[in-house]
Image (tube, rainbow, N blue to C red):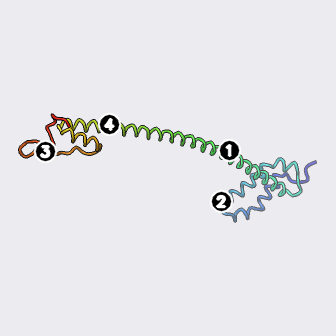
Amino acid sequence: MGRTNPTYRDALSAIEDRWSPYRRALRRRDRERFDRLFGYARGHADAAGARNHRNPLVAALIGIALEQERRHDDAEREREGLADELAAVADRLDRIDGRLNRIDGRIERIEGRVDDVEAAVDAAALDHQLDAADYPPAVTALANRLGDAEVPDVDCSGDDGEMLDGADDGEGGA
């Protein structure tokens, strides 16, 4: 003896045909979604056929609801995985930030050392310039006390080539 009811797949196709005017009235982007819903119902056709409900639309809606629930669960798991991944990236960024702070501290210490070396080199160069220019010791001492001051380009001799008062030719003491 044969079945008295049509198969679920046949009944689902008939339901889809009855809803085709509705589908045509939908916007294109929603037509794809509508077709997907019937695809979900077809995906659960074996279970719906085994139930052999008097109203196949009920079985179709249950199949659609099951598929929507599955998609929701999948999205939830994906969101949790992304949240875990984001937390790991944030932790790594914190570690990198700590390393960068330590590097910044090292750079500042190196810059301080470079400044110290530059100051020592500048002082040595100033002493060398003053010695080479044969400035009196008092000018050399004053220039060393001033530190960054420029070496004056002044002639310390008078019009007749004699040294001015209080200045000697470098052979005497301070």
Q: Where is residue 122 in the image (x, y as percent from the top left)?
A: 29, 39
Does 40 appear above or below 157? below
Does 143 appear above or below 10? above
Amino acid of disc 2: Arg
Are dots 1 and 3 in contact, CB under 8 Å? Answer: no
Which tag is nearer the camera, tag 3 or tag 2?
A: 3
Task: Locate residue 53: give its quadrant.
Answer: bottom right
Tag shown at residue 165: 3
**Viewer-proximal residue among 46 and 94:** 94
Amino acid of disc 3: Asp
Separation (CA) of disc 4 from disc 2? 76 Å
The residue indicated by pointer 1 is 81
Q: Quadrant of the C terminus?
A: top left
Amino acid of disc 1: Gly
Closer to the chain start, of discs 1 and 2, is 2
The residue indicated by pointer 4 is 120
